[in-house]
């Protein structure tokens, strides 16, 4: 378990440092959650509704 945590931390650091992983990546990143994207989407939808606009989304899995 300790070795797994060390490798995971180092790999995450390397991917972020070399911009291999996107800054907007949330899933699997310490301190971030996939719920962050849901909150962001909800905020965009509410702002669009208040301004009489529409929001178009595409979900890929």
Image (cartoon, grey):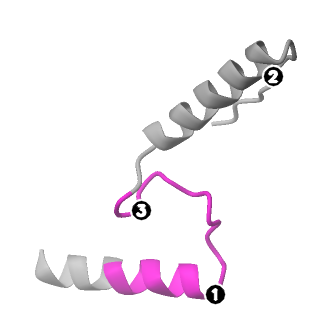
Residue under numbered circle 3? 29
The spot of residue 39 in percent (x, y) is 52, 33
Q: Is 1 above or below relative to 26?
A: below
Q: Quadrant of residue 28?
A: bottom left
Residue found 33% across the figure and 80% down from its top: 9
Is residue 11 found inside the magenta-colored segment of the image? yes
Residue under numbered circle 2? 55
Give the CA separation, mark 1 to mark 3. Answer: 16 Å
Q: Quadrant of residue 45?
A: top right
Name the front one of labels 2 and 1: 2
Relative to residue 51, is residue 7 drawn left or right?
left
Label 1 neighbour load within 10 Å: few <14, some 14-19, many 20+: few
In which quadrant of the rendered image does the N terminus lie? bottom left
Is residue 32 found inside the magenta-colored segment of the image? no
Residue under numbered circle 1? 18
Q: Determine the secondary structure under disc 1.
A: loop
**Looking at the image, do the residues carrying marks 1 and 3 touch, with CB atoms under 8 Å apart?**
no
Instruction: Give the mark, 2 or 3, whose residue is nearer the N terminus.
Output: 3
Q: Which residues are magenta?
A: 9-31
Relative to residue 16, is residue 35 drawn left or right?
left
Give the CA separation, mark 2 to mark 3. Answer: 27 Å
**Looking at the image, do the residues carrying marks 2 and 1 touch, with CB atoms under 8 Å apart?**
no
């Amino acid at each position: 378990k300790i070795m797994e945590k060390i490798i995971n931390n180092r790999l995450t650091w390397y991917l972020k440092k070399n911009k291999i992983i996107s800054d907007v990546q949330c899933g699997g990143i310490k301190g971030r959650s996939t719920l962050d994207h849901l909150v962001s989407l909800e905020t965009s939808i509410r702002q669009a509704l208040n301004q009489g606009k529409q929001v178009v989304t595409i979900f890929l899995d």
